[in-house]
């Protein structure tokens, strides 16, 4: 039997287009190669320009979690107060990171499927003096997008705290700017909306964050110390840790694609197509777990239709057999639905294939759907693009 090609539609890694794959397949050169040094410098320059950062941008080998740790390590001193605004599983990841640093931690949690609000943050800031506030822009476990710009305004107005945004499942697919929005540290990684294979961590540090780093002196961490990486970001011919040469080239191509599309259009495309996929699955009885004011344009959690009798493991196995790799749910949603990404450099063909596979998996799992109903909603919307 001919094997069905499997689309990677989890919330990351996302599909990697051919031109980016080609960069990863190039013959590797020395990290001191003059052409590579120029390419690396261009990547750092583009990251600062596109995300409007008057401070510094860092690109290094690692995961999004490493970037989270880098953020905390460089701007928080032992015994300082941190407010963690958590919309789910990955927002909670800051808890362990902060506890290990000896920080005084308070958590502002949201109900699963909802977001922490600016009003809630304002209330917490009025009650206590915080040196750091963290928020996850898009929560991968719930498909919730936090109102980061509005929260930033509250943080700047009501406190002197530094504002850290986890952009792992958002950056490159949802609007974020450093200086205009008032973000002090933004962090992300390569395999989400950038559409590059896993392996790169990226972090932007605004001027206030860099000033705070200067007050901390020698920190316990070595690999993720801003001061170790800063000379390399200013001149990639220098050495601290070996850069992943081919991934840097891949990121350069990803940024070229973004500039060609235009960031405003890229963000608008994610909004349009994310809403279309949501509407398509709602048409056949699925529920989008994130409440409407907080739905992320980059990924969604789809809860199984009530009374459908769908078994989670069976459905996701069938969906994989039909050509779409999805992700299981976490926390409060575990076993109740599946997670699907719709971000990065995916095209209309990919979206149509993914929704068609969902319809087939429903039928094979014993949940009868009208074939073409979800696809019709999607196709009608895509035809207007």
Image: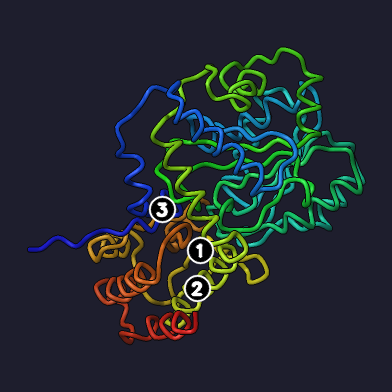
Which residue in the protein does label 2 denote? 278
Element on which disc 1 rests: strand
Label 1 or label 3, whichever comes before in sequence order: 3
Q: Is residue 339 visible?
A: no
Q: Is residue 106 visible?
A: yes
The answer to the question of whether label 1 and label 2 lie on touching residues, with beta carbons closer than 8 A, is yes
**Residue at image location 84% in from the left, 38% down from the top:** 161
Tag shown at residue 370: none
Q: Is residue 194 above or below residue 48?
A: below
Answer with left or right where residue 244 lies relative to residue 115.
left
Q: Nearer the viewer, residue 367 or 73?
A: 73
Tag shown at residue 300: 1
Q: Is residue 88 above or below residue 145?
A: above
Answer with left or right where residue 27 lies relative to residue 164.
left
Residue 312: x and y in percent read 36, 62
Answer with left or right where residue 127 lies relative to residue 22.
right
For marks 1 and 3, give the one nearer the viewer. Answer: 3
Which residue in the protein does label 3 denote? 14
- Residue 233, quarter of the rendered image: top right
Disc 1/disc 2 C-alpha distance (Å):
7 Å
Q: Nearer the viewer, residue 52 or 199?
A: 52
Disc 1/disc 3 C-alpha distance (Å):
14 Å
Q: Is residue 371 above or below residue 194?
A: below
Residue 263: x and y in percent read 60, 59
């Amino acid at each position: 039997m001919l094997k069905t090609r499997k689309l990677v539609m989890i919330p990351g890694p996302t599909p990697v287009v051919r031109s980016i794959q080609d960069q990863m397949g190039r013959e590797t050169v020395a990290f001191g190669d003059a052409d590579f040094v120029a390419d690396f410098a261009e990547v750092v320059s583009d990251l600062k320009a596109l995300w409007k950062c008057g401070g510094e941008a860092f690109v290094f080998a690692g995961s999004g979690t490493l970037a989270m740790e880098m953020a905390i390590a460089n701007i928080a001193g032992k015994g300082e107060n941190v407010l963690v605004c958590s919309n789910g599983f990955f927002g909670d990841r800051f808890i362990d990171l902060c506890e290990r640093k000896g920080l005084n931690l308070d958590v502002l949690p949201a109900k699963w499927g909802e977001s922490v609000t600016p009003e809630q943050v304002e209330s917490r800031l009025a009650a206590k003096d915080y040196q750091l506030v963290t928020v996850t822009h898009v929560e991968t476990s719930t498909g919730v997008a936090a109102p980061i710009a509005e929260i930033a305004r509250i943080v700047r107005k009501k406190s002197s705290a530094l504002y850290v945004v986890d952009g792992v499942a958002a950056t490159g697919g949802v609007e974020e700017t450093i200086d205009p929005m008032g973000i002090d540290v933004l962090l992300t990684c390569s395999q989400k909306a950038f559409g590059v294979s896993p392996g790169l961590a990226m972090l932007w540090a605004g001027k206030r964050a860099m000033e705070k780093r200067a007050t901390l002196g020698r920190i316990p961490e070595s690999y993720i110390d801003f001061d170790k990486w800063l000379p390399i970001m200013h001149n990639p011919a220098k050495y601290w840790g070996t850069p992943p040469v081919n991934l840097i080239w891949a990121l350069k191509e990803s940024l070229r694609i973004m500039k060609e599309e235009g960031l405003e259009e890229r963000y608008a495309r994610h909004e349009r197509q994310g809403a279309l996929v949501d509407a398509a699955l709602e048409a056949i009885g699925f529920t989008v777990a994130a409440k409407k004011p907080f739905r992320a344009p980059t990924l969604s959690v789809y809860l199984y239709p009530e009374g459908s009798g769908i078994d989670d493991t069976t459905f996701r196995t069938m969906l994989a057999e039909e050509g779409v790799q999805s992700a299981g749910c976490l926390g409060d949603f575990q076993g109740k639905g599946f997670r699907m990404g719709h971000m990065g450099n995916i095209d209309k063909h990919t979206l149509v294939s993914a929704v068609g596979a969902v319809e087939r998996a429903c039928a094979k799992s014993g949940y009868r759907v009208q074939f073409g109903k979800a696809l019709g909603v999607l196709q009608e919307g895509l035809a207007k693009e």
